[in-house]
Amino acid sequence: MAVPFTYHAKAQSTFKPPLIANENAFLGDVQSSEKENPDKPISCGFYRLEKGTPLVYTYTYDEMKIIVEGSFEISDETGQKVTATPGDVFYFPKGSTITFTTEDYGLGFYTGQRKQGEA
């Protein structure tokens, strides 16, 4: 039996993630494989941070992120710190604590090994 793919036209410019923390951190899943593969789901969507309060997040799952607009300062507990710009790709392993800040705004597309909405 054939299985169709799912398509989200122009999601980068049309999907508006909801506020999840502070006054400036927005995140929302666009798609998840949870219904088709409940044992090993992956979810993806967009994370946007605007100038203001840094977001400190401890990952309870593995995630990968590509920066698609703007820029972030991304640091971890080891002291590693990067200025992230469009095209940069990150892997955040389960258990890592990451701090995100921005001078203006940043938008990243992520995929995480988790159920939909478990951020």
Image (cartoon, helix red, strand yellow):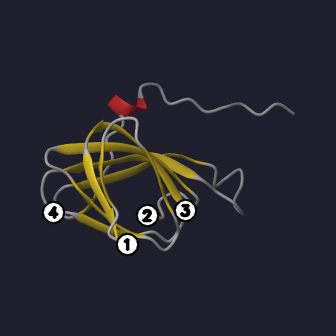
Residue at 37%, 72% in the rendered image: 78
Going from N to C along the chain, the mark reached first, 3 or 4, is 4
Identified at 44% across, 71% down, the residue is 96
| Residue 7 placement (x, y as % from top left) | 56, 29
Mark-to-mark CA distance, 4 and 1: 21 Å
The residue under the point 61% across, 33% down is 6
Return the residue nearer the eye: 71 or 78.
78
How far is disc 3 from disc 4 in space, using C-alphas?
24 Å
Question: SS at mark 2?
Answer: loop
Q: Position of residue 21 (x, y in %)?
A: 25, 64
- Crowding at mark 2 (Cα within 10 Å: few <14, some 14-19, many 20+): some
Give the side of residue 74 with respect to residue 112, left or right: left
Q: Nearer the viewer, residue 98 or 113?
A: 98
* Residue on which disc 1 sits: 78
**Lateral position of residue 5 relative to residue 10, left or right:** right
x and y percentages locating residue 117 in the rendered image: 47, 59
Answer with the quarter of the image where residue 119 lies.
bottom left
The spot of residue 90 in percent (x, y) is: 45, 51
Question: In this orientation, which residue lies closer to the viewer: 38 or 110?
Answer: 110
What crowding class fits label 3: few (fewer than 14 Cα within 10 Å), some (14-19), or many (20 or more)? some
Q: Which residue is mark 2?
A: 119
Q: Earlier in the sequence, mark 1 or mark 3?
A: 3
As helix, strand or loop, the secondary structure at mark 3 comes to loop
Q: Which residue is under mark 3?
A: 62
Q: Left or right: where does residue 30 sit relative to residue 1?
A: left
Against 68, is 20 above or below?
Answer: below
How far is the residue under mark 3 from the one under mark 2? 11 Å
Figure check: 67 above or below 4: below
In the rendering, which numbered label is found on residue 53?
4
